Image (spheres, rainbow, N blue to C red):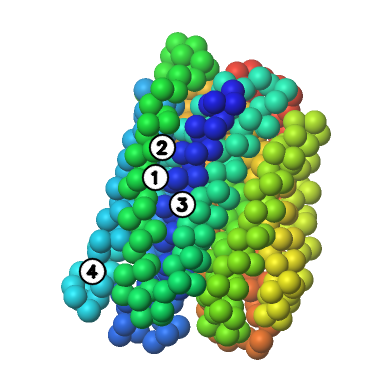
Amino acid sequence: MPRLAAASLVGTAIEFYDFFVYGTAAALVLGPLFFPTFSSLAGTLAAFGTFGVGFVARPLGSVLFGHIGDRRGRRPVLVASLLLTGASTVAVGCVPTYGTLGVAAPVLLLVLRFLQGLGLGGEWGGAVLLTAEHAPPGRRALWSSFPQIGPAVGFLLANGVMLVLSASLSDAQFAQWGWRVPFWMAGALALGGLWLRSSLAESPRFLEIDDHARVPLEEVVRHHWRLVLLTAGALAVGYAVFYAVTTWSLTYGTERLGVSRTVMLTCIMAAVVVKGSLTPVMALLGDRYGRKPLCLVGCTASVLWTFPMVALLATGQPLLMFIGFTGALVAFITMFAVVAAYLPELYEPRVRCTGAAVGYNLGGVLGGALTPIVATALAEHSGRVPWGVAAYLTAIALLSLGCFALLPETRPVPVAAVEPVAG
Protein backbone atom coordinates (compact mmCIF):
# COMPACT_ATOMS: atom_id res chain seq x y z
CA MET A 1 0.00 0.00 0.00
CA PRO A 2 2.76 2.58 0.70
CA ARG A 3 4.32 1.95 -2.72
CA LEU A 4 0.97 2.07 -4.49
CA ALA A 5 -0.09 5.20 -2.61
CA ALA A 6 3.21 6.90 -3.45
CA ALA A 7 2.85 6.08 -7.15
CA SER A 8 -0.71 7.41 -7.18
CA LEU A 9 0.33 10.58 -5.36
CA VAL A 10 3.27 11.28 -7.68
CA GLY A 11 1.27 10.64 -10.84
CA THR A 12 -1.64 12.77 -9.69
CA ALA A 13 0.76 15.53 -8.64
CA ILE A 14 2.32 15.55 -12.12
CA GLU A 15 -1.03 15.72 -13.90
CA PHE A 16 -2.33 18.46 -11.64
CA TYR A 17 0.95 20.32 -12.07
CA ASP A 18 0.14 20.38 -15.78
CA PHE A 19 -3.38 21.62 -15.10
CA PHE A 20 -2.47 24.23 -12.48
CA VAL A 21 0.46 25.74 -14.33
CA TYR A 22 -2.01 26.78 -17.03
CA GLY A 23 -4.30 28.39 -14.45
CA THR A 24 -1.43 30.43 -13.00
CA ALA A 25 -0.28 31.48 -16.46
CA ALA A 26 -3.87 32.46 -17.34
CA ALA A 27 -4.04 34.65 -14.24
CA LEU A 28 -0.67 36.32 -14.84
CA VAL A 29 0.26 36.52 -18.49
CA LEU A 30 -1.88 34.73 -21.12
CA GLY A 31 -4.43 37.52 -21.58
CA PRO A 32 -2.04 40.16 -23.00
CA LEU A 33 -0.06 37.57 -25.03
CA PHE A 34 -2.94 35.76 -26.71
CA PHE A 35 -5.76 38.33 -26.57
CA PRO A 36 -3.92 41.66 -27.05
CA THR A 37 -6.78 43.31 -28.95
CA PHE A 38 -9.04 42.95 -25.89
CA SER A 39 -9.21 45.33 -22.96
CA SER A 40 -7.40 44.29 -19.79
CA LEU A 41 -10.61 42.89 -18.25
CA ALA A 42 -11.76 41.20 -21.45
CA GLY A 43 -8.31 39.68 -21.97
CA THR A 44 -8.33 38.21 -18.47
CA LEU A 45 -11.85 36.85 -18.97
CA ALA A 46 -10.82 35.32 -22.31
CA ALA A 47 -7.75 33.69 -20.72
CA PHE A 48 -9.96 32.29 -17.95
CA GLY A 49 -12.35 31.12 -20.68
CA THR A 50 -9.61 28.92 -22.15
CA PHE A 51 -8.89 27.82 -18.57
CA GLY A 52 -12.55 26.79 -18.21
CA VAL A 53 -12.41 24.67 -21.38
CA GLY A 54 -10.21 22.25 -19.47
CA PHE A 55 -13.02 21.67 -16.99
CA VAL A 56 -15.57 21.13 -19.75
CA ALA A 57 -13.28 18.48 -21.24
CA ARG A 58 -12.82 16.67 -17.93
CA PRO A 59 -16.22 14.89 -17.87
CA LEU A 60 -15.62 13.80 -21.47
CA GLY A 61 -12.26 12.43 -20.38
CA SER A 62 -13.92 10.61 -17.50
CA VAL A 63 -16.33 8.98 -19.97
CA LEU A 64 -13.55 7.98 -22.36
CA PHE A 65 -11.08 6.74 -19.76
CA GLY A 66 -13.86 5.46 -17.50
CA HIS A 67 -14.93 3.14 -20.30
CA ILE A 68 -11.35 1.85 -20.53
CA GLY A 69 -11.11 1.54 -16.74
CA ASP A 70 -14.35 -0.44 -16.42
CA ARG A 71 -13.69 -2.62 -19.48
CA ARG A 72 -9.90 -3.06 -19.55
CA GLY A 73 -8.69 -2.18 -16.07
CA ARG A 74 -7.66 0.77 -13.90
CA ARG A 75 -3.94 0.52 -14.68
CA PRO A 76 -4.10 1.34 -18.44
CA VAL A 77 -5.99 4.54 -17.58
CA LEU A 78 -3.08 5.81 -15.48
CA VAL A 79 -0.59 5.45 -18.32
CA ALA A 80 -2.76 6.82 -21.14
CA SER A 81 -4.05 9.83 -19.20
CA LEU A 82 -0.55 10.81 -18.06
CA LEU A 83 0.77 10.63 -21.63
CA LEU A 84 -2.03 12.79 -23.01
CA THR A 85 -1.84 15.46 -20.32
CA GLY A 86 1.95 15.67 -20.39
CA ALA A 87 2.21 15.95 -24.17
CA SER A 88 -0.47 18.63 -24.44
CA THR A 89 1.13 20.66 -21.62
CA VAL A 90 4.54 20.67 -23.31
CA ALA A 91 2.82 21.76 -26.52
CA VAL A 92 1.22 24.75 -24.75
CA GLY A 93 4.71 26.01 -23.95
CA CYS A 94 5.57 25.90 -27.65
CA VAL A 95 2.55 27.80 -29.03
CA PRO A 96 3.55 31.14 -30.63
CA THR A 97 1.67 34.17 -29.34
CA TYR A 98 -0.96 36.26 -31.11
CA GLY A 99 1.72 38.59 -32.42
CA THR A 100 3.23 35.71 -34.45
CA LEU A 101 0.27 33.51 -35.40
CA GLY A 102 -2.70 35.83 -35.07
CA VAL A 103 -6.06 34.22 -34.33
CA ALA A 104 -4.58 30.74 -34.75
CA ALA A 105 -2.61 31.21 -31.50
CA PRO A 106 -5.59 31.35 -29.08
CA VAL A 107 -7.32 28.60 -31.11
CA LEU A 108 -4.33 26.30 -30.61
CA LEU A 109 -4.28 27.24 -26.93
CA LEU A 110 -7.94 26.27 -26.67
CA VAL A 111 -7.39 22.89 -28.33
CA LEU A 112 -4.42 22.02 -26.14
CA ARG A 113 -6.26 23.06 -22.99
CA PHE A 114 -9.11 20.78 -24.05
CA LEU A 115 -6.67 17.87 -24.39
CA GLN A 116 -5.23 18.68 -20.96
CA GLY A 117 -8.69 18.45 -19.44
CA LEU A 118 -9.43 15.24 -21.33
CA GLY A 119 -6.38 13.56 -19.81
CA LEU A 120 -7.00 14.85 -16.31
CA GLY A 121 -10.61 13.64 -16.49
CA GLY A 122 -9.30 10.09 -16.67
CA GLU A 123 -6.44 10.50 -14.19
CA TRP A 124 -8.45 10.98 -11.02
CA GLY A 125 -10.69 7.95 -11.51
CA GLY A 126 -7.83 5.60 -12.34
CA ALA A 127 -5.53 6.74 -9.54
CA VAL A 128 -8.19 6.82 -6.84
CA LEU A 129 -9.78 3.50 -7.78
CA LEU A 130 -6.49 1.65 -7.99
CA THR A 131 -5.67 2.85 -4.47
CA ALA A 132 -9.16 2.45 -2.97
CA GLU A 133 -9.66 -1.04 -4.35
CA HIS A 134 -6.33 -2.26 -2.93
CA ALA A 135 -6.87 -0.66 0.50
CA PRO A 136 -8.27 -2.47 3.56
CA PRO A 137 -11.81 -1.23 4.40
CA GLY A 138 -10.86 0.19 7.79
CA ARG A 139 -8.17 2.44 6.30
CA ARG A 140 -9.62 3.08 2.86
CA ALA A 141 -10.07 6.82 3.37
CA LEU A 142 -6.48 7.17 4.61
CA TRP A 143 -4.85 5.34 1.70
CA SER A 144 -7.20 6.91 -0.84
CA SER A 145 -6.29 10.36 0.43
CA PHE A 146 -2.78 10.12 -1.02
CA PRO A 147 -3.95 10.83 -4.58
CA GLN A 148 -5.81 13.78 -3.04
CA ILE A 149 -2.50 15.14 -1.74
CA GLY A 150 -1.29 15.10 -5.35
CA PRO A 151 -3.17 18.28 -6.36
CA ALA A 152 -1.52 20.20 -3.49
CA VAL A 153 1.93 18.94 -4.51
CA GLY A 154 1.23 19.74 -8.15
CA PHE A 155 0.01 23.20 -7.27
CA LEU A 156 3.05 23.94 -5.12
CA LEU A 157 5.39 22.69 -7.82
CA ALA A 158 3.66 24.69 -10.57
CA ASN A 159 3.47 27.88 -8.57
CA GLY A 160 6.92 27.39 -7.05
CA VAL A 161 8.43 27.36 -10.53
CA MET A 162 6.32 30.39 -11.49
CA LEU A 163 7.37 32.16 -8.28
CA VAL A 164 11.09 31.60 -8.93
CA LEU A 165 10.76 32.78 -12.52
CA SER A 166 8.62 35.77 -11.56
CA ALA A 167 11.10 36.84 -8.88
CA SER A 168 14.26 36.30 -10.95
CA LEU A 169 13.17 37.64 -14.35
CA SER A 170 12.07 41.06 -15.46
CA ASP A 171 8.46 41.51 -16.54
CA ALA A 172 9.60 41.62 -20.17
CA GLN A 173 11.62 38.39 -19.86
CA PHE A 174 8.81 36.63 -18.04
CA ALA A 175 6.30 37.62 -20.74
CA GLN A 176 8.69 36.76 -23.58
CA TRP A 177 9.83 33.28 -22.56
CA GLY A 178 9.81 32.77 -18.78
CA TRP A 179 6.19 31.64 -18.58
CA ARG A 180 6.93 28.82 -21.05
CA VAL A 181 9.52 27.08 -18.86
CA PRO A 182 7.02 25.41 -16.47
CA PHE A 183 5.16 23.94 -19.46
CA TRP A 184 8.36 22.48 -20.93
CA MET A 185 9.19 20.91 -17.57
CA ALA A 186 6.01 18.84 -17.82
CA GLY A 187 7.70 16.53 -20.34
CA ALA A 188 10.39 15.40 -17.91
CA LEU A 189 7.86 15.02 -15.10
CA ALA A 190 5.56 12.89 -17.29
CA LEU A 191 8.42 10.53 -18.19
CA GLY A 192 9.22 10.10 -14.50
CA GLY A 193 5.58 9.39 -13.70
CA LEU A 194 5.31 6.79 -16.48
CA TRP A 195 8.39 4.98 -15.16
CA LEU A 196 6.92 4.93 -11.65
CA ARG A 197 3.54 3.63 -12.80
CA SER A 198 4.84 1.01 -15.21
CA SER A 199 5.16 -1.69 -12.54
CA LEU A 200 1.85 -1.17 -10.68
CA ALA A 201 -0.43 -4.18 -10.25
CA GLU A 202 -4.00 -4.15 -11.49
CA SER A 203 -6.81 -3.64 -8.98
CA PRO A 204 -7.86 -6.93 -7.35
CA ARG A 205 -11.47 -5.72 -7.29
CA PHE A 206 -11.45 -5.27 -11.06
CA LEU A 207 -9.97 -8.76 -11.57
CA GLU A 208 -12.84 -10.24 -9.53
CA ILE A 209 -15.52 -8.82 -11.87
CA ASP A 210 -16.95 -11.60 -14.03
CA ASP A 211 -19.49 -9.58 -16.00
CA HIS A 212 -18.03 -6.30 -17.22
CA ALA A 213 -20.42 -3.59 -18.33
CA ARG A 214 -20.59 -3.46 -22.15
CA VAL A 215 -21.24 0.29 -22.22
CA PRO A 216 -20.50 1.63 -18.70
CA LEU A 217 -21.83 5.13 -19.43
CA GLU A 218 -25.18 3.72 -20.51
CA GLU A 219 -25.54 1.84 -17.22
CA VAL A 220 -24.49 4.88 -15.22
CA VAL A 221 -27.03 7.13 -16.97
CA ARG A 222 -29.80 4.55 -16.71
CA HIS A 223 -29.32 3.35 -13.15
CA HIS A 224 -27.22 5.97 -11.35
CA TRP A 225 -28.21 9.33 -12.86
CA ARG A 226 -29.50 10.66 -9.53
CA LEU A 227 -26.27 9.71 -7.77
CA VAL A 228 -24.15 11.37 -10.47
CA LEU A 229 -26.11 14.62 -10.18
CA LEU A 230 -25.95 14.62 -6.39
CA THR A 231 -22.20 13.99 -6.30
CA ALA A 232 -21.58 16.67 -8.94
CA GLY A 233 -23.62 19.21 -6.96
CA ALA A 234 -21.98 18.18 -3.69
CA LEU A 235 -18.43 18.58 -4.99
CA ALA A 236 -19.04 21.90 -6.77
CA VAL A 237 -18.24 23.92 -3.64
CA GLY A 238 -14.79 22.36 -3.32
CA TYR A 239 -13.83 23.37 -6.84
CA ALA A 240 -15.35 26.84 -6.46
CA VAL A 241 -13.48 27.56 -3.24
CA PHE A 242 -10.19 26.10 -4.43
CA TYR A 243 -10.09 28.02 -7.71
CA ALA A 244 -11.36 31.21 -6.10
CA VAL A 245 -8.34 31.03 -3.79
CA THR A 246 -5.70 29.76 -6.20
CA THR A 247 -6.69 31.40 -9.50
CA TRP A 248 -9.15 34.28 -9.18
CA SER A 249 -7.57 35.82 -6.07
CA LEU A 250 -4.19 35.85 -7.83
CA THR A 251 -5.58 38.08 -10.57
CA TYR A 252 -7.60 40.20 -8.14
CA GLY A 253 -4.67 40.74 -5.80
CA THR A 254 -2.18 41.70 -8.51
CA GLU A 255 -4.47 43.78 -10.75
CA ARG A 256 -6.98 45.37 -8.36
CA LEU A 257 -5.07 45.57 -5.08
CA GLY A 258 -1.62 46.19 -6.51
CA VAL A 259 -0.01 43.34 -4.54
CA SER A 260 3.08 41.89 -6.20
CA ARG A 261 2.95 38.51 -7.94
CA THR A 262 5.56 37.18 -5.53
CA VAL A 263 3.56 38.09 -2.42
CA MET A 264 0.30 36.70 -3.79
CA LEU A 265 1.88 33.43 -4.88
CA THR A 266 3.64 33.07 -1.51
CA CYS A 267 0.41 33.59 0.47
CA ILE A 268 -1.52 31.12 -1.66
CA MET A 269 1.24 28.51 -1.62
CA ALA A 270 1.58 28.72 2.18
CA ALA A 271 -2.15 28.04 2.54
CA VAL A 272 -1.89 25.09 0.13
CA VAL A 273 0.92 23.63 2.26
CA VAL A 274 -1.43 23.65 5.26
CA LYS A 275 -4.15 22.02 3.17
CA GLY A 276 -1.85 19.28 1.91
CA SER A 277 -0.49 18.57 5.39
CA LEU A 278 -3.99 18.15 6.84
CA THR A 279 -5.22 15.78 4.12
CA PRO A 280 -4.26 12.47 5.83
CA VAL A 281 -5.50 13.80 9.18
CA MET A 282 -8.94 14.51 7.76
CA ALA A 283 -8.92 11.13 6.00
CA LEU A 284 -8.25 9.35 9.31
CA LEU A 285 -11.22 11.19 10.80
CA GLY A 286 -13.26 10.00 7.82
CA ASP A 287 -12.28 6.39 8.56
CA ARG A 288 -13.27 6.85 12.19
CA TYR A 289 -16.43 8.99 11.98
CA GLY A 290 -17.64 8.42 8.44
CA ARG A 291 -17.44 10.08 5.03
CA LYS A 292 -20.69 12.03 5.08
CA PRO A 293 -20.16 13.76 8.49
CA LEU A 294 -16.77 15.12 7.35
CA CYS A 295 -18.30 16.36 4.11
CA LEU A 296 -21.14 18.11 5.93
CA VAL A 297 -18.72 19.76 8.37
CA GLY A 298 -16.44 20.99 5.59
CA CYS A 299 -19.33 22.26 3.49
CA THR A 300 -20.86 24.12 6.45
CA ALA A 301 -17.47 25.70 7.18
CA SER A 302 -17.34 26.88 3.56
CA VAL A 303 -20.75 28.54 3.93
CA LEU A 304 -19.57 30.38 7.05
CA TRP A 305 -16.09 31.35 5.83
CA THR A 306 -16.57 32.78 2.32
CA PHE A 307 -17.48 36.31 3.46
CA PRO A 308 -14.58 36.52 5.98
CA MET A 309 -12.20 35.10 3.36
CA VAL A 310 -13.14 37.75 0.78
CA ALA A 311 -12.91 40.52 3.39
CA LEU A 312 -9.43 39.36 4.45
CA LEU A 313 -8.30 39.18 0.82
CA ALA A 314 -9.49 42.75 0.20
CA THR A 315 -7.12 44.08 2.88
CA GLY A 316 -4.13 43.27 0.69
CA GLN A 317 -2.16 42.42 3.85
CA PRO A 318 -0.12 39.20 3.42
CA LEU A 319 -0.81 37.73 6.87
CA LEU A 320 -4.56 38.44 6.70
CA MET A 321 -4.79 37.08 3.16
CA PHE A 322 -2.97 33.92 4.28
CA ILE A 323 -5.45 33.45 7.14
CA GLY A 324 -8.37 33.88 4.76
CA PHE A 325 -6.97 31.44 2.21
CA THR A 326 -6.04 28.87 4.88
CA GLY A 327 -9.51 28.86 6.43
CA ALA A 328 -11.10 28.32 3.01
CA LEU A 329 -8.72 25.49 2.04
CA VAL A 330 -9.07 23.72 5.40
CA ALA A 331 -12.84 23.66 4.87
CA PHE A 332 -12.20 22.37 1.34
CA ILE A 333 -9.91 19.52 2.37
CA THR A 334 -12.23 18.44 5.18
CA MET A 335 -14.55 17.37 2.37
CA PHE A 336 -12.11 16.31 -0.33
CA ALA A 337 -9.82 14.21 1.88
CA VAL A 338 -12.58 11.58 2.14
CA VAL A 339 -14.10 12.01 -1.34
CA ALA A 340 -11.58 9.60 -2.88
CA ALA A 341 -12.96 6.81 -0.67
CA TYR A 342 -16.55 8.06 -0.64
CA LEU A 343 -17.26 8.19 -4.39
CA PRO A 344 -15.97 4.69 -5.26
CA GLU A 345 -17.97 3.25 -2.36
CA LEU A 346 -21.16 4.74 -3.82
CA TYR A 347 -20.92 2.84 -7.13
CA GLU A 348 -20.93 -0.86 -7.94
CA PRO A 349 -17.56 -2.20 -9.20
CA ARG A 350 -18.62 -2.83 -12.82
CA VAL A 351 -19.29 0.88 -13.50
CA ARG A 352 -17.26 2.44 -10.71
CA CYS A 353 -14.52 4.01 -12.84
CA THR A 354 -17.06 5.77 -15.07
CA GLY A 355 -19.59 6.72 -12.39
CA ALA A 356 -17.17 8.09 -9.80
CA ALA A 357 -15.07 10.00 -12.36
CA VAL A 358 -18.07 11.51 -14.18
CA GLY A 359 -19.63 12.73 -10.92
CA TYR A 360 -16.30 14.12 -9.72
CA ASN A 361 -15.53 15.97 -12.94
CA LEU A 362 -19.05 17.31 -13.47
CA GLY A 363 -18.57 18.95 -10.08
CA GLY A 364 -15.49 20.58 -11.61
CA VAL A 365 -17.58 22.06 -14.41
CA LEU A 366 -20.15 23.44 -11.96
CA GLY A 367 -17.67 24.83 -9.48
CA GLY A 368 -14.31 25.23 -11.20
CA ALA A 369 -14.90 26.25 -14.81
CA LEU A 370 -17.07 29.27 -14.11
CA THR A 371 -15.71 30.54 -10.79
CA PRO A 372 -12.70 32.54 -12.07
CA ILE A 373 -14.82 34.06 -14.87
CA VAL A 374 -17.85 34.90 -12.71
CA ALA A 375 -15.71 36.13 -9.81
CA THR A 376 -13.66 38.40 -12.10
CA ALA A 377 -16.82 39.89 -13.60
CA LEU A 378 -18.46 40.39 -10.19
CA ALA A 379 -15.34 41.97 -8.69
CA GLU A 380 -15.09 44.44 -11.56
CA HIS A 381 -18.43 46.01 -10.59
CA SER A 382 -17.85 46.13 -6.84
CA GLY A 383 -15.98 48.35 -4.43
CA ARG A 384 -12.72 47.44 -2.74
CA VAL A 385 -14.38 44.44 -1.05
CA PRO A 386 -16.03 42.21 -3.71
CA TRP A 387 -19.02 41.05 -1.68
CA GLY A 388 -20.65 39.70 -4.84
CA VAL A 389 -17.93 37.06 -5.06
CA ALA A 390 -18.59 36.04 -1.46
CA ALA A 391 -22.32 35.77 -2.18
CA TYR A 392 -21.65 33.65 -5.27
CA LEU A 393 -19.39 31.25 -3.33
CA THR A 394 -21.91 31.04 -0.48
CA ALA A 395 -24.70 30.13 -2.90
CA ILE A 396 -22.62 27.29 -4.35
CA ALA A 397 -21.75 26.09 -0.84
CA LEU A 398 -25.44 25.98 0.12
CA LEU A 399 -26.24 23.98 -3.02
CA SER A 400 -23.49 21.50 -2.17
CA LEU A 401 -24.63 21.25 1.45
CA GLY A 402 -28.09 20.19 0.28
CA CYS A 403 -26.62 17.58 -2.08
CA PHE A 404 -24.35 16.12 0.62
CA ALA A 405 -27.35 15.87 2.95
CA LEU A 406 -29.13 13.67 0.37
CA LEU A 407 -26.22 11.28 -0.17
CA PRO A 408 -25.98 8.08 1.93
CA GLU A 409 -23.17 7.16 4.30
CA THR A 410 -20.94 4.28 3.14
CA ARG A 411 -18.47 3.60 5.99
CA PRO A 412 -17.53 0.92 7.02
CA VAL A 413 -19.17 -1.23 4.34
CA PRO A 414 -16.53 -2.93 2.13
CA VAL A 415 -16.31 -1.51 -1.38
CA ALA A 416 -17.54 -4.64 -3.13
CA ALA A 417 -20.61 -4.92 -0.92
CA VAL A 418 -22.00 -1.41 -1.30
CA GLU A 419 -25.32 -1.38 -3.12
CA PRO A 420 -25.62 1.32 -5.79
CA VAL A 421 -28.01 4.19 -5.23
CA ALA A 422 -30.60 3.70 -7.94
CA GLY A 423 -31.75 6.59 -10.10
User: Which residue is depicted at the point 54% across and 26% down?
Assistant: 3
Label 2: which residue? 193
Dots 1, 3 in contact, CB < 8 A: yes
Residue depth check, mark 4 versus mark 1: number of the one nearer the observer: 1
Dot 2 or dot 3, earlier in sequence: 3
Query: Alpha-carbon distance for marks 2 and 4?
Result: 28 Å
User: Which residue is depicted at the point 39% across and 87% down?
Assistant: 39
Residue closest to the far left: 101
The amino acid pointed to by label 1 is Leu
User: Which is nearer the eye, 305 or 193?
Assistant: 193
Dot 1 or dot 3, earlier in sequence: 3
Dots 1, 2 in contact, CB < 8 A: yes
Dots 3, 4 in contact, CB < 8 A: no
User: Which residue is depicted at the point 55% across and 44% down?
Assistant: 150
Q: Secondary structure at mark 2?
A: helix
Residue closest to the far right: 289
Picture disc at residue 96: 4
Left/right of residue 196 with respect to residue 399 in the rendered view: left
Picture disc at residue 189: 1
Q: Secondary structure at mark 3?
A: helix
The amino acid pointed to by label 2 is Gly
Quadrant occupied by the C terminus: top right
- Residue 219 position, x and y percent, is 45, 30
Label 3: which residue? 17
Q: Is residue 227 visible?
A: no
Query: Alpha-carbon distance for marks 4 and 1?
Result: 23 Å
Query: Alpha-carbon distance for marks 1 and 3?
Result: 9 Å
The amino acid pointed to by label 4 is Pro
